[in-house]
Image (spheres, rainbow, N blue to C red):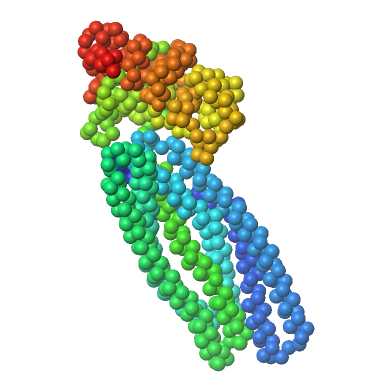
Amino acid sequence: MNTKLPIADGPTVRKHTAMLLRANSRPLTGVITLHTLAALAGLVGPLLLGSLVDAVAQGTTSSYVNKLVGFLVLAVLAQTVLIRFAQRNAMIFGETVFADLREDFLATVTELPLSTVERSGTGDLVGRTTNDVDRIQHSVRFGVPRILVASVTIVLTVIAAFFTAPLVALAMLVGMPIIGVIGRWYLKRAAPAYQRESAAYAAINGSITESVEGARTVDALGLGARRRAKVDADLREAFAAETRTLNLRTVLIPGMDSAFVIGPIAVLVWGGYLLSQGQVTIGAVTTVVLYSTQLVGPVWELIFWLDEIQVAATSLARIIGVGLVERDREQGDRTPADEHIVATGVEYAYRPGHNVLHGIDLDLAVGERLAVVGPSGAGKSTLGRMLAGIHPPTGGSVKVGGVPLIELPLEDLRSHVALVTQEHHVFVGTLAENLRLADVTADDAALLDALEAVDARTWVQALDKGLETEVGSGGYVLTPAQAQQVALARLVLLDPHTLILDEATSLLDPRAARHLERSLNAVLAGRTVVAIAHRLHTAHDADRVAVVDGGKITEIGSHDELVAADGEYARLWHSWQQA
């Protein structure tokens, strides 16, 4: 059952935006100051031209004209210099704000409860970390500074126009009712339309990603037509969502265009009438006409970014929404007395009312090796996650040293217990960087020792650059078995007391897996190990074996005891030997 990640509401988005701006208030103030000075310098031109028109009408001298032209040149040069530094500071401001936003978002994503991510599906989260981040970065880097510039320019230009000739300047406001009506109509519909568009692209991401990652399964089960139909349906929804936002723009842009065209015409007509009545001078009318024409640029820019900001605001709401996910645990301040792990009455349900585990009790002796076996879908991996503190139990508790695992800070939790599964990831970077994810202080000798413990040192040193070999996307391609050895080496470096190994050697062939497990014995000595496996030689070597079936532990004891009991484990053992 997919549960969508939350989306922040308007007040939350505005509060978060204000917080970002407050955190960068000093550079923001500098940007606004420089642009204000640049805008003031830009207002000098129309004022001087208006004065020149009046001077010519009344009679003037060439020296006076030269003087005005000199002032005009100085104003243009001053505006040019101010704009240059203002734009530079604005770009730095935009990059800084976006960097803060991106770092906060990534920190939030990495702290999301794993159960929430699994329920919401990969498409939604991938869409927020890719499409939404891409959409917002342009607006933050360019839009926020340009909106500030346009707003300051508009305000100062209007003030200057009214200061020059208040009666003439009134005509500049003729288009305001049109702007107000269209703007209100657009804003009321834009947010839900763009949210629909973002959700549609998230669905496409999920469908395509799942189809590609599960391509072999799709082919094996003949699901190609069904998957194509799913992608086609998602594409139709995306097309419909894009059409809706396009329709909004076809009303917004022409409507605003008409409002802007009316302004200068109205000023010219109204100013001509006032001039005929002797209430204003021709220079004043000229100045206000130039101001009204000068407004078109910044107002158009403001309208353009109004649409872009709607896209960014929608993406920002989705990004902030990730931080609204309820945490699945509350950190406590108790310290475990020892490394003794005890599970009591553990239950777990991925969906309410559909338990996967049913009241499991398990007492792990410190330093014990427990093998967990059972049929597929019995709940073995889920039990492993409970014992590793990945998911909080929906019933019962798992404690280490008397403290519930879910009360431990994540850093402390991983120093007590760690989980390695058959799922692993190789990050872009060197092998050394991949290994140091577990211990940033480890030197090359420690990395090689960890690789030695998992039978990987030989092939790593055979690489041209050894530990400095670039791996991951675009780098040296590790085989699934090598990637699994890297994951196990990280575990060695992490050095937890309790290890949960969920099919951790499944990608190795049986002989290599057996050899690796024997090599790990020295590393595992003195640690508590829970090994979830289908290969029963792991169970044969364990101190105890727990058989899980139907979300319950149906048998537990040593290998010899369970074989002698002639129960489910004995049947599994005999069938495995005959295979």
The reply to whether residue 113 is in sight is yes
- Residue depicted at x 66% and y 86%: 54
Q: What is the x, y in percent for residue 155? A: 55, 68
**Is 158 on the left-hand or right-hand side of 176?**
right
Q: What is the x, y in percent for residue 129? A: 44, 45
- Residue depicted at x 32% and y 27%: 382
Quadrant containing the C terminus is top left
| Between 387 and 19, the one nearer to me in the picture | 387
The reply to whether residue 25 is in sight is no
Quadrant containing the N terminus is top left
Image quadrant where residue 500 sits = top left
| Between 238 and 138, the one nearer to me in the picture | 238
Q: What is the x, y in percent for residue 412? A: 46, 25
Q: What residue occupies the far bottom of the structure in this picture?
A: 276
Q: What is the x, y in percent for residue 332? A: 42, 27
| Between 23 and 107, the one nearer to me in the picture | 107
Rendered position, 33 above or below 551: below
